[in-house]
Image (cartoon, rainbow, N blue to C red):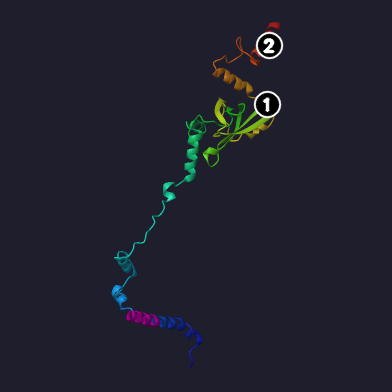
Amino acid sequence: MSTPTHCIRPLGPLKQALRQCRAERRSYATTQELYPSLQTRYPPPTPGFRPSQAMKQNRFEEGMKKIPVAQPPRSTLKACPDPIAAVTASQLTTLDPTGARARLFAHSNPDRVQPGDILLVRLKNSTPFSGICLNIRQRHSPIDTAILLRNQLTRIGVEMWFKVYSPNVESIEVVQRKEKRARRAKLYYLRQPKHDVGSVEGVVRQYQRQRMGGPVGGGKNAKGRDANAGRKKNNQRGRN
């Protein structure tokens, strides 16, 4: 009975490997016979030969030049585990060296700016702008913090975004704080006519007058629209 072909085929590669081993042995023997000096310099491997031992022996052999090995570069992961945080910290030290603006919007500060407060932003290349803070946008990075202020100019509602750490922003001052804290983080409902506060220029003007040491309310020494309003009231009382 003949052997099936599927049982004979797996032995083909094995026979080929045996033939190759025999041919290598013969070539090694002929090389030793033709070049006997190789046998003295490179003796045949001993029983229990391991390539790792041979590499260690040949590494310090006399008359052989050492192979120069370059040192591996420094690991950037160990030098700077979080490069984004390092760059942000360096920018914050440049834009806010005293840390006053960081404390003004820090969550750990109980006196931080919150929606509903009236702020005065002084700019280097433009006139100052004041208004009610509608939103404080804090994204993934603290350097992207921005505020949205709303005010009325010539009875028209105007809203402007300001980057807190922008080089154009000279200072941010809290003119008046909201008495009752808002339950919302975004006071967009103030855009509606029934909730619109209106212009805050009077509050800002009074804050500036008080800061410069002048009279708070209208009186004899007051100047401007407030003083005229006080005179009109006195005139009306005298007529009555």
Circle 1 is placed at which residue position?
153
Q: Quadrant of residue 149?
A: top right
Observer-nearest of 146 and 232: 146
Q: Pick whichever, 150 or 224, lies toward us.
A: 224
Who's the residue at 32% across and 81% down the image?
33
Q: Residue 43, relative to residue 145: is it above or below?
A: below
**How far apart are the alpha carbons under marks 2 and 1?**
25 Å
Crowding around mark 2 (Cα neighbors within 10 Å: few <14, some 14 to 19, many 20+) is few
Q: Secondary structure at mark 1?
A: strand
Residue at left 68%, top 26%?
A: 153
Task: Report x, y in % for residue 217.
Answer: 60, 15
Write down the region rendered in magenta: 22-34
Quadrant of the rendered structure where residue 230 is? top right
- Amino acid at circle 2: Lys
The extreme bottom residue here reads: 1
Residue where numbered disc 2 is placed? 232
Q: Amino acid at mark 1?
A: Leu
Q: Is residue 4 above or below residue 211?
A: below
Residue 171 in the image: x percent, y percent? 55, 28
Q: Which mark is residue 7?
A: none
Dot 2 lies on which element?
helix
Residue 167 locus on image (x, y percent): 55, 33
In percent of the image, x 55 and y 26: which residue is there? Answer: 174
